[in-house]
Image: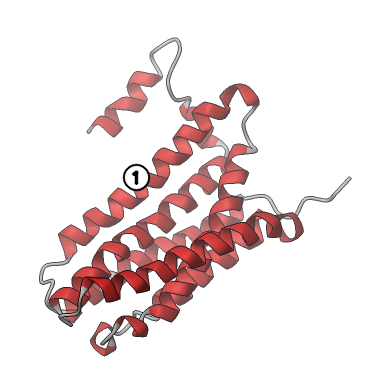
Amino acid sequence: LLLVVFPFWERRVASPVVDFSLLSRGAFFGGGSIIALQNMAMYPLLFQLPVFFDRVRHLGARTMGQALLALTLAMMLSSVVGGRLTEFIGARAQTLAGSLLALTGLWWFADFDSIRVPFDVLPGMLLMGAGVGLTSPPAQAASMSTVGREQAGMAGGVVSTMRYIGGVAGTTALGVLLHDSASPASHQRLLFVYAGALIVAAALSALLPGRQKRA
């Protein structure tokens, strides 16, 4: 409710906290939305997998923690590479490739009934982490490139807020749709939400700039 009221309030004050006209800029809206949608797919999965291995496969938390570490490491390493790669292929191509890579990683979870141990999801975790890591730097840079120095703080706050809204939306979907945490079929139902978010993120990459010619 507050998110609905807030824009109306901001349009009526002399010095708004958020200038919502930023969202009318294609690259800004596209970059922030891509980050939000990828978090909508990744964050709830980080909650879901430990529950799955605990309630369905009855495995310990330490084993699952090692698998989650793989996603984090892949995301960190690919972020470093992604920041430099954008100079050569452009934000549009890189965010598209990263979203498709994350979608490929999600495909690894297509049959929860066949997942027995954390090693079964390790390749998917690595691919998703690499995809998100490749996508975040160019998406955020493309968003920030549309604003001047005087709006940089505001724009950075908006992008960060969109990031967390995506994560909250995904974990909310997890809480609503996971009716039976002991059923593989119930876990698998959530993949449609994650896949939909990543497909829309891939489509929004068209709003970002392509490769910039060097002077």
Q: Residue at x 17, y 58 (%)?
A: 175
| Kind of residue indicated by mark 1 | Ile
Instruction: Indicate the position of residue 213 as horizontal and vertical percent values.
Output: 83, 51
Q: x, y (%) of residue 96? A: 58, 63
Q: Residue furthest bottom?
A: 114
Answer above or below: position of 170 versus 123.
above
Figure quadrant of residue 147: top right
Residue 132 location in percent, x, y?
A: 49, 61
| Figure quadrant of the C terminus | top right
Please give the count of numbered marks on the rendered protein.
1
Task: Give the answer, above or below, for where 140 lies relative to 150.
Answer: below
- Residue at the right extreme? 215
In the picture, measured across the screen, residue 165 lies left or right of residue 212, that is: left
- Residue at horizontal 40 percent and vertical 12 percent from the top: 13
What residue is at 51 percent from the left and 34 percent from the top? 156
Please indicate, yes or no, whether residue 134 appears anywhere in the rendered image.
no
Residue visible at 60% across and 21% down?
Answer: 150
Secondary structure of the residue carrying numbered label 1: helix
- Dividing the image into 4 quarters, which one contains the N terminus? top left
Report the side of 120 relative to 179 (left or right). Answer: right
Say which residue label 1 marks.
165
